[in-house]
Image (cartoon, rainbow, N blue to C red):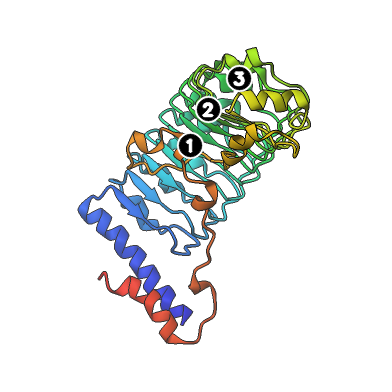
Amino acid sequence: METICHFFRTNYILANCEDVIAKRAITLNLSHYQMSEVPEIIKYCESLMKLYLNQNRLLKIPSCLGNLMRLEVLALDYNKLDEFPLCICNLVRLKFLNVSCNNIVCLPPQLGNLKGLEAFWCNNTGLRILPAEISSCERLQTLGVRGNRLRTLPNSIGNLQELRWFTVENNELAELPSTFGLLQNLIHLNLKGNQLLRFPRLIIALPKLKFVFLNQNQIQDIPTRSELEQLQNLRMLNLCKNPISRQPDLQKLAQHQNNIYVEMLDDVPDSTASIRRHRPNTFEEPEVNPDAGQESSSDWANSVRTSQLNSSEESNLENTIEDISVLLPEMSRYVTTF
């Protein structure tokens, strides 16, 4: 039965590609098709602006994909790529790129060719180094590199003047580069689960900063009230699960400033009950639908959580199923559209 499903699936994919070519369509969605390779016919889909290849089994991307010069959106997350496809760096009109949940431990310097890139996600790939050339992506607004093995960030990151949302959660950072204070448009900063020893005072120079996650680090020094007051737009500073979070001085500061979050001691007076009630979830950068308006992602407090975005469900076609009555619904996905 798997052979039959593979036949229908393959022909359905080809039919979709042929339809794009015939109609000069701008969108092609080939996600969740268990493809191990991209069909060669895709090189003729020259009208494409949006291509979704996520949630497949792709081991590599054909070089011909780099000839789809109109592409603005490319989703490759949840595949089995073991390197960053170099041909992507030819897609100079690309605005949204997602390569998360692959085996990509390094990014090529040619990534800097993507000067129009506005959102880039490279989460949970094992990434070890963020190349200095990323600074050439001057229009970048959203950068997600969480769940990797980054120990440092390049000094050139300060050149990303349009960066608004930056997530480096669950890496191995011990400090931030000296240029970090140049990110004047930064709104949301997630450094949760790193190895920071000191409160990064560079962020005090960021006037638009609203949400800061420093929880689960090794921070041992307490920011002063005057320092925090300089962050005039700050809505949330999460310092939970740091060595300082249970110190009396910070506990008192958290009582007077309801935008500071620490785990409260059991003997804290009832006046802090409101802080307990409003203890936040850890919001993540929204992997934004490029078709959505700006307002849909303007406020990080209303963003969906990462756990709701990351789906790793395995299709029923992964299993050997003998009962044709179970396979028919999956097969009908392909036959009813012809």
**Is residue 17 positioned above or below 262 on the image?**
below
**Is residue 61 positioned above or below 137 on the image?**
below
Could you give the CA–CA distance between mark 1 and mark 3, rounded to whole angstroms?
Answer: 19 Å
Query: Where is residue 260 drawn, in percent x and y?
Result: 62, 28
- Badge 2 vs badge 1, beta-carbon distance below 8 Å: yes
Q: Label 3 belongs to which residue?
A: 203
Kind of residue sitting beneath label 1: Ala
Can residue 221 be seen from the camera position used here?
yes
Q: Quadrant of residue 247?
A: top right
- Badge 3 vs badge 2, beta-carbon distance below 8 Å: no
Tell me the element at label 3.
helix
Kind of residue sitting beneath label 2: Arg
Mark in front: 3 vs 2: 2
Q: Label 2 belongs to which residue?
A: 235
Q: Label 1 belongs to which residue?
A: 301
Query: Where is residue 82 drawn, in percent x and y?
Result: 60, 50
Say few, some or many: other residues with alpha carbon within 10 Å of mark 2 (under 14 / 14 to 19 / 20 or more).
some
Could you give the CA–CA distance between mark 2 and mark 1, rounded to whole angstroms?
Answer: 9 Å
Please give the name of the residue rendered at 36% of the width and 55% of the height, measured from the top-left corner. 29
Q: Quadrant of residue 291?
A: top left
Please give the name of the residue rendered at 73% of the width and 37% of the height, measured from the top-left corner. 241
- Badge 1 vs badge 3, beta-carbon distance below 8 Å: no
